[in-house]
Every structure is written in C-alpha cells, then in structure tokens.
C-alpha cells in the first residue's frame, strides 16, 4: 500500500470546499489498535494509515453523526463527507444507498482494495500487545510485524481475520476514486463457524446459544458499531411498547439478539463489526451469516453489491420459496 | 393413565382469509383442537417477527401464522412480504435451537374451514411432539 | 493475627472450605472473565489478568429487583438480602472502586440495597504481581497492593500466599481457617514488599492527574472533546465495565397481574440517558457525553467527595472497540491551554 498516494489523494479531497471531513484510520495509542480518524484539513492527512489493523468499518460513522436542529437563520451544513472504504465497507455504503439512509451526492468514497485484515487477538496470543503501537504491513500474502524493534513475518493463515477468510469482495464495489491496484480475490473459505452450529442437534444448538447469550451485558456495541443499524428510534430503546425488556437475563438477551439478527437479514454485508466489538465474545457474526447464506442460496440475493437494488425484505418474487408453508 | 401435554399455541390470522376460514370452521361445526389462541391481524404481512419472539417469551409452546394464498391478499402483496420475512425468522429460530415444530405457517382462505382444521391439528400435534417450551420464558418476576 | 502464610498445597482445601460460604471467584465463562460462584470441589485459579466484568456486578447487579408487587395487594415484597458472600481474588483497584462508589451510595440518601450487600460481602484481594497493559492505578492513588476497601489482602509469594487480615471481618475469616495457616515471618513480609515494588515498576502507563480536576471546568468548550469523541460509537462498554460507574435506571416490569420494580445499569454514553420526554436532549451528541464521562470521574466526583472516581484499572482503554483511550484523553486535557 502506497501511503503517500493515499495521503496525497486525501489531502486533495479534504482541501475541497465542498468536503466537511474525511474519515479514515490512524495508528492507535497502544498495541494492535487502529483508531478511526476524522481528517479536517490537509495537514491532518499525515497521520492517515491503511494497514492490516484497519479492520473497522467506517461506514458506521455516516449514520452515527447526530442530526441536530439547525439554529434559526443558519444554513444546514451541506458539505460532503469523504470515507475510506475496503471491499466490505463499500457494501455497507451501497446498502445505505439502497435504503436511502445516506445520499450519494453527500459522499466522496475513496476505495481501497483490501488484501485482508488481521485479527489482532490471534496475533496477541503469540505476540502480546505492547505499550508502543505495533506497526503491521502486508508482505506478499503474509503480514509483516515490527514488534519491539524486530521484523517478524506472520503467515497469512495465522492471523487473517475470520471475516476476511470468508471474504468474497475484497475490492470496493463503489468508489469515486480508488487508491492502489485491485487485489485478486481469493477463494472464500468454508464458513465453518456456521456449519459447526448447524451440525449440532436442536437441543445442542439451544445450549450453545444459551451460553453465548447469557454472557451479553447489553452494552449495545454490536448495534452501534453496525453500519446498518441506524434507526433513529430503535426498538431496543422503546419503552412503549416495550419490545425487549431492559432487564439483563437470558430470555431478554435472546429476544434482543433475535431482533438484531433479524433486522439485518438480507441487509448484513458481513463486515463482522458486531462480533469484533463484542466485549463478551459472543459470535454474533454466525447469526448474521446464517441468514446471509439463506438469502444468498435460496433467494439468490446478496446485499450491498448494487446501490440500485431493491431492499430484500421490502420486495418479493412470486416464486419465492414456500415449501415450509402448510 | 398419563396425562397428555396440551400445548399453548398462539395463532396470528389475517383478517380477510384465515380468520374468516377459522370462522367458517366454527359456523360449519368443524371440530378442531382448542389449544389455539387466535390473534387477529389485518394481514399476515402485519406480523412483526417480534410478535413471534414475544409470544414464545410469554409462554407459547408454538406459534402459527396464517394468511391468504399467494395472489389472494386483500392488500395485493402483504402475504408475499410475510413469506420472505417469516422464512428467515423460521431459519433463525431453528439456528438458535428452537424446535422447528414450534413454528408453522399456512395459507388458509375464507372458504377453507376444513383446511383450517387440518392446519390446527398439525400445529398442535407438532407442538405437542416438541414438548413444553419453558426455556425461553421471561423470568422477570423472579428476584 | 496479622500476616499469615497459606502454603499452595493447602490452597484447594482453603477454597474448598470457603466454597461452603457462598464463595465467588474469577472464572472464564464462555470466553468472558467474570466472577462466578465456586461450587464444592471447583478449582479456583487466580491468574494475572483481571476480569473483564468488574466485581461491582455483585454489589450492584446489572439488574436488581427492588421490590415486587401484585394487583389487589397493598404490601410490597422486598428481597431478603441476608446471605453473606465472599469474593476471592478481587484486584486492589476493584476493591478501591467499591470504597469509592460507597461514598455515593452513602451520600444524601443511604441506599439500603448497596450498603446491605457491601456489609454482607467479604473481599479477599489479590495483589497484582503482573500488571496489565493499561493499568495505571498508582497515577490515581492506588497501587498493585492497595488495601482500601479490602478485608483481606493476599499476595502470591510463589510457594505460598501471604494473607493479611485488614478488617474485623477479614481477621475473623482468617481465624476460622487458622489450622491451614502459619504465622508469616519477616522474610515473607520482605518478599512481599519486594514483589509489590517490582509490580509497581512494571506498570507501563501513567498520567499525572495533578491539575486535571481544576482544569476541566475551563475546558468545557475546548475542541479536544470533539476530537476525542469523534470515533465514539456511543456504546456502553466503557461505562458498564468501569468499576466506578454506578449510574442506573429504574423501570417497572409487568407480567399480567404481577410485576417488579428494578434498577439496571445505565450509561451516560447512551443517547437516551439524558433525553427528556419532550425530545430535548441536553447532551445531544457524543461530544457532550464523552465530556461528561471524563468530567464526572475527574471533576464532579472530586468536588463532591474529594477523590477521583477512576481507579486506573484500564478496562475502558482495553475494551473500547475504537481505541478511545482514557490515558490519551487525560494527556490531551493536561496539554490543553
């Protein structure tokens, strides 16, 4: 990845009068962290990075920004937001456009072909986090760590994030400008996570999810990190009617996770953010991917590929499967 | 003599077909199991999947959703949306370990009183075979 | 009886004896480390890493029933809080946090639930020999072997544990287990001092809070808040898992003719935390919410109770999915004009 090229492009974009800021990543404050970074002027681009640690999906910030009432006599800020996207992130942008959650003319999309990200927790098993930020880059197919002053090559298979092993679209599907050469898509791995659960018997599956959902502390980081969970009035916050009680127990947690997964059915673009941010380590991605498989295999639909597509749950085909109906 | 388990089943029926079908079954004196608690909705497309989740949380052992046959929807296409949506819900419930026999969906028209009887019998038989569903119940009233 | 030694040969017998007394200890529950009840015969393993969920969850449960009610009945039903609890392996920071939070629950209204639980709980602390990556307890007045809030402090000396009874409750418990313990000699105490010093020297991160409480009010409109909160997702990780965060919401839950009133953790990082019925929100964006989180810990609480409501456990920095780092924020506060 040519960082200079990226910074140059970014500087050009943030210098434009019609751009408010650019959302990218910068080095984290310690260990293997990379932080989302809002660049407001050309000087700020020096801190921009794109490395195998930039796993977070920045498209979430497009809808996280609070819409405040504009004071009387002032004009609303109509400037565009620029966003760095990997392949998976670009699908979130597409899906947001499908749902009219954002407007295309208020966006500048900078596409970054993505060779795959690391799951830092896998790295930390062998190379524990250090106080100083660890530099990581791509080296051929593998990852190159600059760890305590030492250069270490970590084989791709050892550290590649799960979502990247399953990735089908490493190149951005929507962008105004692309930095870097397109990468050759790799054969997506079998989704062993979902298959493992499917192979269990019904009571075993229940036991598995009972253990998982019982751990939930309802911090809602999965909801907030998701680029496609952006309802202004979320049913989880509703008191009247109370769809899901706020009490934290297995029953309510399960209802919450069913609601969350269901609301993403046919919309989830499999960026894996929900699972990554979960402090309790609940494999939320499996729920989403299970539904994504069904949508892909039985309805031949994959969300986020086409900004003009019809939203899956708000459309139908007369020949949709109905073998389950009596 | 062992007592047979009598499941509690919540049924969401669309106003225009299935509810009328159940009504016809009643007026035609067609006998069907009394395990069904019917909730009338305007359209099967109105059934929010959370209705199903909520019913299970509140002690239902099974859920049945019934609407007009495809093409017959009073609102033209509500049941088509319901079909997509509830298929996904069915898959999701199955994936987290809810016995698939607890969830049934049917198309019953206003003239199908006899079909309604068969559907209910099937739903009750299924839920009975699956047994009481206690694991998901709200326990909020405990300490 | 002051300092005693428990040889590790007798560890399982020790924990076995306590397990009959409603013992809770850190345990890995499906991938998340938190305090869990120890059954008879369960092994208790204390290792270096602190629990992700702080033991505050035992004194201040995430969902706590205050009382139950039912239709047609005038009397409310209250929980019978009378079972003593022993928490084993509490980190000094988390115990200090309990002492700090207690100030709030003892303030203008004495909260019977929290105080009762506090009274029923015996805290057996474990000094940290291996501090975590983001630990900075000495910066905020604690330390790897701080005793504040604890009843017994335990130090891992390798072959054995050194146990010091700090309160009446703690001493009585040690007295009960006297047959498993032996008097600690001067060499053990010396070894403890050395280990504690070593641990303190291994703490990698620090920030000097001097001047922060005074500076914060003047930084109300500083651009730093926009900067540090821009990446915030608005989730509850930093507050729910903070040992000194105590905000709660109270709700009634009904089921037919019976119901309960319960309080549950709430988070100032949530949008609806300050949202009025009218729709107006005095903390409308993540900027104000982040500012409040830092101000609460490093300014308001200091004004009211004379102590910083942060114990330097590092959880918020460790667990934030977008690398919002408390130490980094504090450094920016110090650097602000």
Image (cartoon, rainbow, N blue to C red):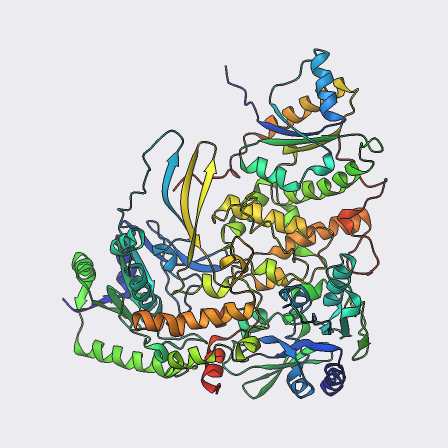
A84 with respect to C210 (left or right): right
Query: For the point 82% across and 41% down, which residue is it?
Result: A320
Where A278 sits versus A14, above or below?
above
Locate residue B125: give its quadrant.
Answer: top right
Total labels: the figure holds 0
Q: Is residue A32 above or below residue B95?
A: below
User: Would you say A320 lies left or right of C257 here?
Assistant: right
- Residue at 66% across / 75% down in the picture? A155
At horizontal 69% and vertical 86% (from top left) the residue drawn is A42
Question: At x 72% / y 73%, what residue is drawn?
Answer: A83
- B143 and C330: which one is in front? C330
Corner quadrant of residue B127: top right
Q: Is residue C17 something one can see in this rendering?
A: yes
- The picture places residue A212, in percent across and down from the top left corner, at 54, 52
C211 left or right of A100? left
Q: Position of residue A46 (x, y in %)?
A: 66, 87
Which corner quadrant holds the N terminus of chain A? bottom right
Q: Position of residue A259 (x, y in %)?
A: 62, 48
Q: Residue furthest front?
A: A73
Q: Position of residue B71 (x, y in %)?
A: 85, 33
* Location of the C terminus of chain A (image quadrant): top right
* Towards the viewer: C185 or C55: C55
Viewer-proximal residue among C84 and C293: C293
Q: Answer yes or no: is residue A30 visible.
A: no
Residue sitting at the far left: C1
Quadrant housing residue B86: top right
């Amino acid at each position: 990845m040519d960082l200079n090229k990226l910074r140059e492009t970014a500087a050009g974009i943030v210098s434009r009068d019609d751009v408010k800021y650019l959302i990218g990543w910068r080095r984290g404050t310690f260990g293997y962290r990379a932080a989302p970074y809002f660049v407001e002027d050309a000087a700020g681009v020096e801190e921009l990075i794109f490395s195998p640690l930039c796993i977070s999906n920045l498209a979430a910030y497009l809808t996280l920004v609070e819409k405040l009432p504009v004071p009387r006599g002032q004009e609303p800020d109509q400037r565009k937001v620029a966003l760095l996207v990997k392949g998976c992130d670009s699908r979130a942008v597409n899906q947001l456009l499908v749902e009219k959650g954002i407007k295309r003319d208020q966006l500048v999309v900078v596409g970054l072909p993505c060779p795959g990200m690391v799951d830092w927790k896998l790295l930390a098993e062998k190379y524990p986090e250090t106080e100083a930020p660890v530099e990581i880059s791509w080296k051929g197919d593998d990852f190159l760590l600059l760890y305590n002053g030492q250069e270490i090559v970590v084989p791709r298979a050892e550290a590649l994030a799960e979502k990247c092993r399953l990735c089908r679209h490493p190149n951005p599907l929507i962008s105004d400008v692309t930095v870097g050469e397109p990468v050759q898509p790799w054969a997506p791995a079998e989704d062993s996570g979902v298959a493992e659960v499917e192979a269990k018997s019904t009571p075993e599956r229940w036991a598995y999810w009972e253990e998982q959902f019982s751990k939930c502390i309802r911090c809602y980081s999965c909801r907030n990190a998701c680029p496609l969970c952006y309802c202004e009035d979320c049913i989880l916050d509703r008191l009247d009617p109370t769809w899901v009680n706020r009490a934290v127990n297995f029953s309510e947690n399960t209802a919450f996770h069913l609601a969350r997964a269901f609301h993403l059915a046919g919309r989830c673009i499999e960026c894996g953010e929900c699972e990554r941010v979960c402090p309790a380590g609940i494999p939320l991605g499996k729920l989403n991917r299970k539904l994504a498989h069904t949508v892909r295999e039985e309805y031949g639909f994959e969300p986020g590929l086409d900004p003009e597509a019809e939203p899956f749950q708000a459309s139908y085909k007369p020949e949709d499967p109905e073998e389950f109906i009596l | 003599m062992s007592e047979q388990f009598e499941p509690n089943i919540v049924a969401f029926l669309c106003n225009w077909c299935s509810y009328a079908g159940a009504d016809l079954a009643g007026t035609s004196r067609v006998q069907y199991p009394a395990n069904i608690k019917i909730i009338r909705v305007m359209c099967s497309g109105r059934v929010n999947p959370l209705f199903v989740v909520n019913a299970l949380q509140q002690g239902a052992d099974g859920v049945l959703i019934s609407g007009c046959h495809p093409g017959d929807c009073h609102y033209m296409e509500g049941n088509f949306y319901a079909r997509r949506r509830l298929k996904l819900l069915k898959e999701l419930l199955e994936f987290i370990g809810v016995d698939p026999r607890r969830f049934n969906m049917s198309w019953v028209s206003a003239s199908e009183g006899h079909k309604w009887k068969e559907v209910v019998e099937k739903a009750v038989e299924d839920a009975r075979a699956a047994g009481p569903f206690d694991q998901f119940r709200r326990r909020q009233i405990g300490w | 009886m002051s300092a005693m030694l428990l040889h590790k040969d007798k560890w399982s017998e020790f924990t076995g004896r306590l397990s009959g007394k409603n013992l809770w200890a850190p345990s890995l529950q499906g991938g998340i480390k938190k305090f869990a009840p120890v059954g008879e015969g369960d092994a208790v393993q204390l290792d270096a890493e602190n629990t992700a969920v702080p033991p505050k969850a035992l004194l201040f449960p995430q969902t706590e029933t205050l009382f139950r009610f039912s239709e047609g009945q005038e009397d409310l039903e209250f929980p019978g809080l009378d079972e003593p609890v022993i928490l084993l392996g509490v980190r000094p920071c988390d115990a200090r946090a309990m002492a700090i939070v207690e100030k709030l629950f003892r303030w203008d209204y004495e909260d019977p639930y929290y105080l009762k639980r506090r009274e029923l709980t015996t805290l057996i602390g474990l000094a940290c020999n291996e501090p975590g990556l983001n630990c900075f307890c000495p910066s905020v007045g604690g330390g790897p072997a701080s005793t504040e809030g604890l009843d017994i402090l335990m130090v891992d000396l390798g072959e054995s544990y050194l146990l010091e009874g700090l309160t009446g409750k703690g001493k009585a418990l040690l007295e009960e287990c006297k047959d498993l313990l032996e008097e600690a000699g001067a060499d053990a105490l010396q070894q403890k001092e050395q280990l504690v010093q070593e641990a303190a020297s291994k703490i990698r991160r620090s920030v000097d809070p001097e001047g922060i409480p005074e500076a914060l009010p003047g930084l109300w409109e500083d651009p730093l808040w926009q900067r540090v909160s821009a990446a915030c997702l608005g989730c509850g990780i930093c507050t729910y898992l903070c040992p000194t965060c105590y905000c709660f919401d109270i709700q009634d839950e009904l089921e037919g003719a019976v119901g309960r009133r319960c309080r549950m953790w709430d988070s100032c990082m949530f949008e609806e935390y300050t949202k009025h019925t009218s729709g107006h929100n005095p903390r409308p964006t993540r900027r104000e919410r982040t500012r409040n989180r830092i101000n609460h810990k490093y300014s308001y609480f200091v004004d009211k109770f004379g102590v910083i409501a942060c114990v330097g456990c590092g959880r918020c920095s460790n667990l934030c999915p977008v690398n919002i780092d408390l130490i980094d924020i504090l450094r920016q506060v110090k650097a602000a004009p």
